[in-house]
Amino acid sequence: METELNELMQVRHQKLDELRATGMDPFGGRFEVSHHAGQVLALEAHLENQEVSLAGRLIAKRGHGKASFAHLLDVTGQIQVYARQDEIGEKMYKLFTELDLGDIIGVAGPVFKTRTGETTINIRRITLLCKSLRPLPEKWHGLKDVDLRYRQRYVDLIANPEVRKVFLLRSGIIKAMRRFLDDRGFLEVETPTMHTIAGGAAARPFITHHNALDIDIYMRIALELHLKRLLVGGMERVYELGRVFRNEGISTKHNPEFTMMELYQAYADYSDMMTLTEEMIAYIAQENLGTTRISYQGQSIDLTPPWPRLTMLEAVKRYGRVDFNLINSDAAAREAAQEIGVLVGATDTWGKVINEVFEAVVEPYLVQPTFILDYPIEISPLAKQKKEDPRLTCRFEAFITCRELANAFSELNDPIDQKQRFLEQAKQRAAGDEEAHMMDEDFVRALEYGMPPAGGLGVGIDRLVMLLTDMPSIRDVILFPTMKPREE
């Protein structure tokens, strides 16, 4: 296979040398594009006999002596082109017939319909814009090796038109999210991606070193703490769409580098965030898909608000048959979990045990959009306590297709409470928990100036795109997912 590829590439390199010998530039320059393939096909009746110019990649070609057909692919799709030697001359026709699949060309000529009714461009002029030195995969039958598709996304986008549609829809999803938030008075901001303290989430960070300052710096694991500082500064509604980095495992649901949207709204709470979340997701689906009733991997999903609400304790009682409201000690909680087959750590607290049980026995049932409310305080160091039950916090996560899609709090704005929770997290970190939150004295200082009561929300953009494009893996919706390098 490799030998055959090398031979094909040698032939293309020979053609490259021959083109250069004639004085032609095989890697072209500017070309005036008047239309794209999709526009010509959509407006064929209005464009018939009018001259258009298009540029794209040659993906199919067939010749009939002194006349040849081909197909060009651009960002909107493909269109047929037609060349005749007696119309464009022997030299230009020879160039056309000797083109390889994968070459990028520009063509100009009138639009017409063939006898079979196919909209076609009758070439009057042709320009070679880029000579392709590698053949397209599998003679244009598509790139099937999934691992290779992720590694060579540039080829995947050429060979598999449905992949381009996913990423066009991803762009539409993000645009709709911005419109929704902008229309509600939120201001889009940018905050640092390199932090001296990794905070805002329970995750292991990537560490790098700044030579000039001679300090270690962390790639951010969340957007939260800088955005909250902006609330302190008087910016009442802010959001950011940005990359987040977590030094964790890779799976169909996780990539070390992913995209988050986080927003913070002063004078709101987590009930406001629930309303905002369900309305925003429904709006994005309606804008991009024309419906709030979608299909994901064969399952019918209804995104229409309102979504069901269930506390974590209620959910564990319903699906795990354990009422942790009746359990008052860490040891009893661990024992209850083990009795239903959930493995927990020997020192796990009541709250951590509940979360482990929830992940094991509840999440598989959360197919339809569902808000899970009131998480234990041990796993929610940045959320307000519930006044009626200080073991719990005003926090929710939104689940769809058994995956967490969003996470939100009534934000903790008590600097004394926040510092105490950071200290508790620091103890856990010292005991070996690499995901425990670091102490952030500057954030505490910011809270001491006063942060208004607020609701905060984080949404995983990649998982949202997976949902709305019906993709089974996060790698299908990230253009260049993290991969272990192959030996060449």
Image (spheres, rainbow, N blue to C red):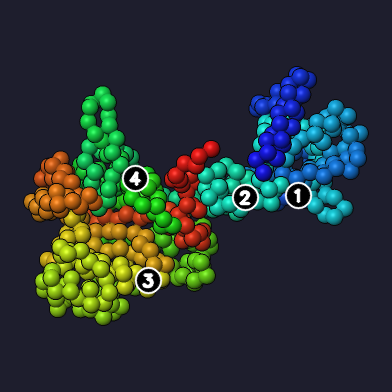
For mark 1, does the 10 Å Cα neighbourhood hold few (<14), some (14 to 19), or many (20 or more) residues? some
* Upstream in sequence: badge 4 or badge 2: 2
What residue did someone put label 2 on?
Answer: 143
Under mark 4, the amino acid is: Phe
Of residues 165 and 286, the one drawn nearer to the viewer in this rendering: 165
Under circle 3, the secondary element is: helix
Q: How far apart are the two marked residues, 3 and 1, measured between alpha carbons?
A: 50 Å
What residue did someone put label 4 on?
Answer: 245
What residue did someone put label 1 on?
Answer: 44
Q: Are marks 1 and 4 in contact (CB under 8 Å)?
A: no
Looking at the image, residue 311 sits to the left or right of residue 391; the answer is right
**Location of residue 203 with respect to 280 vertically, above or below:** above
Of residues 218 and 47, the one drawn nearer to the viewer in this rendering: 218
Under mark 1, the amino acid is: Glu
Residue occupying the point 82% across, 44% down: 62
* Upstream in sequence: badge 1 or badge 4: 1
For mark 3, does the 10 Å Cα neighbourhood hold few (<14), some (14 to 19), or many (20 or more) residues? few
Of residues 345 and 179, the one drawn nearer to the viewer in this rendering: 345
Q: Are marks 4 and 3 in contact (CB under 8 Å)?
A: no
Depth-wise, is mark 2 or mark 3 nearer the camera? 2
What residue did someone put label 3 on?
Answer: 364
* Upstream in sequence: badge 4 or badge 3: 4
For mark 4, does the 10 Å Cα neighbourhood hold few (<14), some (14 to 19), or many (20 or more) residues? many
Looking at the image, residue 325 sits to the left or right of residue 134; the answer is left
Residue occupying the point 53% across, 50% down: 147
Give residue 139's mark.
none
Q: Are marks 3 and 1 in contact (CB under 8 Å)?
A: no
Depth-wise, is mark 1 or mark 4 nearer the camera? 4
Q: How far apart are the two marked residues, 4 and 3, measured between alpha carbons?
A: 26 Å
Q: How far apart are the two marked residues, 2 and 3, measured between alpha carbons?
A: 33 Å
